[in-house]
Image: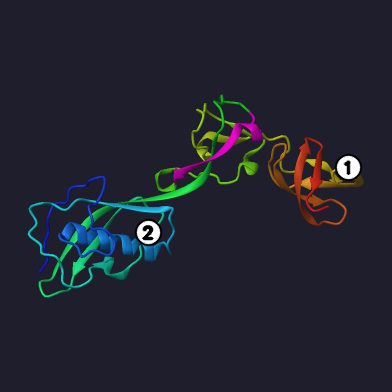
């Protein structure tokens, strides 16, 4: 029998202690959600599932079999709010739909200090912090090194998540520019030149086509006239 009812979202879902038989449907659903999340996340302790409190008007008995969650379909681990189907296939079957919120904790790049629009980012400007990745509405970053040399396009507060929305390229080379290719940290230039294949700022990677050999190599921008071959 299909029971349709309004479900009220609550911060947590009450449940019985692990190993204890549930005394209420609420507790049984909580235990089933925990087990389901553990299976979906392979025991990943960075995942937390918060589910809705069942409407007290529901008249459901504790199922005499293990509850089935979502008919075995996996959760979308990249989506915060979603709804899952909870089914009892016991002697008194029932099924309900429960709204849940999935938190996925992730180390992401944040501003280490207040930044103004136009500031060129250095290593000292960036830090890592644990955020709820499922609440990030825009592309975020996990490696501060890849953002060095980029420019803030809007003010950032200390601890604020750095996203593609508030960053831009502080370009010193553009596609088609001719640059000298440097080999190694000693500043030795082998006399070859290359044509820049993209747009990049100091410290950023850019592909360069060697004008002599025609080979495209990965480089790091030193300044507007020089790049350093990676691995050279």
- Is residue 129 magenta-colored? yes
Relative to 153, does residue 63 appear above or below in the rendering? Answer: below
Within 10 Å of the Cα at label 1, are there few (<14), some (14-19), or many (20+) other Cα atoms? few
Residue at 42% across / 62% down in the picture? 43
Q: Residue beneath label 1, please?
A: 186
Q: How many marks?
A: 2
Relative to 45, does residue 108 appear above or below in the rendering? Answer: above
* Quadrant where the image shows the N terminus: bottom left
Image spot of residue 126 (x, y percent) = 59, 35
Residue at 62% across / 27% down in the picture? 119
State which region is magenta: 120-132
What is the quadrant of residue 75 in the picture? bottom left
> In this rendering, would 226 be left or right of 197?
right
Which numbered dot is residue 76?
A: 2
Residue at 37% across / 59% down in the picture? 76
- Is residue 57 magenta-colored? no
Image spot of residue 201 (x, y percent) = 70, 37
Secondary structure beneath dot 1 equals loop
Secondary structure beneath dot 2 equals loop
């Amino acid at each position: 029998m299909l029971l349709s009812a309004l479900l009220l979202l609550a911060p947590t879902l009450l449940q019985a202690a692990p190993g204890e038989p549930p005394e209420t449907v609420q507790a049984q659903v909580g235990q089933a959600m925990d087990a389901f999340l553990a299976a979906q996340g392979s025991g990943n302790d960075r995942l937390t599932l918060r589910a809705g409190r069942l409407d007290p008007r529901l008249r459901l008995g504790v199922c005499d079999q293990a509850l089935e969650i979502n008919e075995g379909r996996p959760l979308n681990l990249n989506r915060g709010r979603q709804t899952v189907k909870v089914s009892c296939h016991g002697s008194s079957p029932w099924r309900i739909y429960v709204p849940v919120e999935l938190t996925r904790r992730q180390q992401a790049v944040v501003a280490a200090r207040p930044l103004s629009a136009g500031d060129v980012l250095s290593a000292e400007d960036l830090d890592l912090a644990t955020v709820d990745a499922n609440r990030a509405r825009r592309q975020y970053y996990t490696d501060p090194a890849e953002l060095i040399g980029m420019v803030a396009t809007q003010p950032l507060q200390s601890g604020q998540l750095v996203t593609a929305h508030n960053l831009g390229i502080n370009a010193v080379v553009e596609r088609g520019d001719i640059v000298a290719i440097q080999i190694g940290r000693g500043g030795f230039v082998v006399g070859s030149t290359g044509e820049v294949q993209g747009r990049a700022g100091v410290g950023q990677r850019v592909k360069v086509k060697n004008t002599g050999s025609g080979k495209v190599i990965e480089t790091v921008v030193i300044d507007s006239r020089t790049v350093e071959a990676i691995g050279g």
